[in-house]
Structures are given as structure tokens and as C-alpha cells.
Image (tube, rainbow, N blue to C red):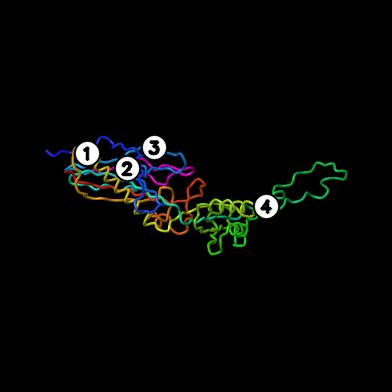
Amino acid sequence: MKTRLTILALVAMALAALAVACGGAGPKVTVEKGLAAAVGQYGEGQAAPEAASQASAVGAETGASAAVPGALGTRAGMSAPYALGGAFAPSAQAAAAGLTVQGYGRATAPADSARVQFVVSKSGEIYPKPLPAEPGAVPEGGVESEIAPATPPEIYPTPISPSPITEADLKPLMDAIKAQGVSDADIEVVIYPSGYYDPYGSGSAGVTVTLRDPADRVGALVDAGTQAVNESGTLMLQNVGVLYSVDDCSALLREARRAAVEDGRENGAGLADALGVSLGDILSASEYTYAPFGPSPCDPSFDTYYGYGYEGSPYDPAMPAEVQIVSNVSISFSIR
């Protein structure tokens, strides 16, 4: 009779022991493996909760897909955009006789550049000055007489919508940006049609600034631009987004993938030892990669999901100026 193996418990792993040194990725790249890489959080003093990589054994007669527990962690002011599991997790392929494990790896590097986008529109509806009271309403001597109230159309004239926004309207914002040492070559202006971001029908504009070595520059730029818009008296700030990037995304992905495969192998070896069997050859493998904290040009799905014109995540001063990529692999091994 053929025996069907079912795993009844998770393989407990202390996350504190899962951080590994970067192997050959250069001093700037930090690499982690295990579920610590999948659920890690930004913010000083925020420790990821203990978790375990989940594995499932596949019997000779049936195959089982490895489920992926939990959801990604969150950082201050923003929930992680993805949940592990469902359509996003790699599915474990059925094997004739073996076991399937998950592996996680995360690589993090300081951003080499940032794109900061201010989306602004004209400020709200403009009301003409109220009509003056009729002559003779206040007699000589300054004593008010009883008069019939004016009708609402006379007191509150019809509002006038703002004129369409133009590049000339953006001068306060542009001056503030250039005062931060940004050249014209690093500023892009796009005028959007009416109804895009603007609530008053005047159209809106996106002003995108490219910064190199952004670690100490993004916050000052956002503060200066926001203050200029608020003090302009004519502009309204709709959104400030930031998109961080590194020059070599392939190196970051390579390190995340290496850590994920290493984690998967360790999980497979530990599970095989617990079952009293020997780990055999790899039967199949699949991978899903993602950026855990908002869109990133290093995410292979970035162009598909975000496309042209996306200004990145809403600016969060607590967000480090860095880029992360997570690799989630599913590996099936034969059993000896």
C-alpha cells in the first residue's frame, strides 16, 4: 500500500537567525531570507513577528500545493499592497512522490535616484464680491432701519470656475523647486485635461523632479514645494508621490533570488530530517517576485500594473530612501 504523507505542523524558525550577510552583492545591499524577508517592516524598533516557512509533503498518489500563510507587514501610514497567497504566490506543482517547500529572500539597497511628483490644480471656485446694499438702506445718523432682506442671488452671486491651469500658474512651485538646486533638465511638466485629479474642472498639472543621491534631498524638496503651493493662493496640492530606483535592478533581484533558493533548500532539508527521509533531486520550482512597499521599477510587474505616468507611493517621511525586492520561490524535491 502506498503511503500518503501529510505535514501536520509548521517548521518553527526563529527569524532573528534568518538575516544573512550579502554574498558578493557589494557593501550597499542588505540580504535577508526566510519569512523575515517577506513580512519585515520599516521603522526603527519594529521587529517582525516570529513566523515559520510552510511546507507540504506530496504523496505518491496525490499532489498538494503549498499554501503561503499571512500577509505582508505594514509601515507607518501605509498598508502593504500585496497579500501573500492566492494569485500572487507561486503554486507548488504536483510531484510523483516528494515534498514542496517555500523559500523567501529580500534584497535592499539605498536608492540611487528618486522621482518626486507634485500634482496640483487651481484652487476652488471663485465668488465675486457680494452686491452692495441698496442706497438709503442706512439713513443719516447711522441708525439702521428695517429693510427687507436681499434675495440670495443678490447676496451670493453665481460662482466663477477657475480658468484652465497653465505652466505660468506653476511659477511659485517651479521657483521653490529650483531654489533646491534642481536644474531645468531634471524637471518635467505635464498639463492634464479637465477631470484628471482636479475637483473644480480647471485641469491639473504634474511637476516631476528627478533627484540623484536622494537620501538627504527628497524631504527638503517636498517641504519647499508644499509650502510654495500652500502660500500661492491660487494652487491646490492634490498629491505628492515618490518613486525610488537603483541603477542595477538585476543585481538586487539576483541577491533576493539567491537568498530565497537558499532558504528553500534549508527548509527542505529540515523537513526531510523531521520526517526521517532523505532529500532527493529538485523536481520543479516556481517564483514570484514583488516590491513589498509600493511600486518599484525593480518589480518585474511594474510596467504591467502601474504603466506610464504613475507617480509612485504617496510621500512618507518615515520611508527610507531605498529599494526592496522580495523573491518567493516554491521548490519540490523528491524523497529518498
The mark that comes first in sequence, 4 or 2, is 2
**Residue tagged 2:** 68
| Quarter where residue 35 is shown | top left
Which x, y percent locates residue 285?
A: 26, 50
Q: Say which amino acid is labelled 1.
A: Asp
Real-space CA distance between mark 4 and mark 3, rounded to the nearest whole angstrom? 55 Å
Real-space CA distance between mark 4 and mark 1, rounded to the nearest whole angstrom? 77 Å
- Say which mark, if any, is on residue 273: 1
Q: Say which amino acid is labelled 3.
A: Pro
Residue nearest the observer in this picture, 303 or 324: 324
- Badge nearest the viewer, 2 or 1: 1
**52 is higher (above) or lower (below) than 320:** above
Q: Quadrant of the N terminus?
A: top left
Real-space CA distance between mark 1 and mark 3, rounded to the nearest whole angstrom? 26 Å
| Callouts 4 and 2 close, C-beta under 8 Å | no
**130 is higher (above) or lower (below) than 272:** below
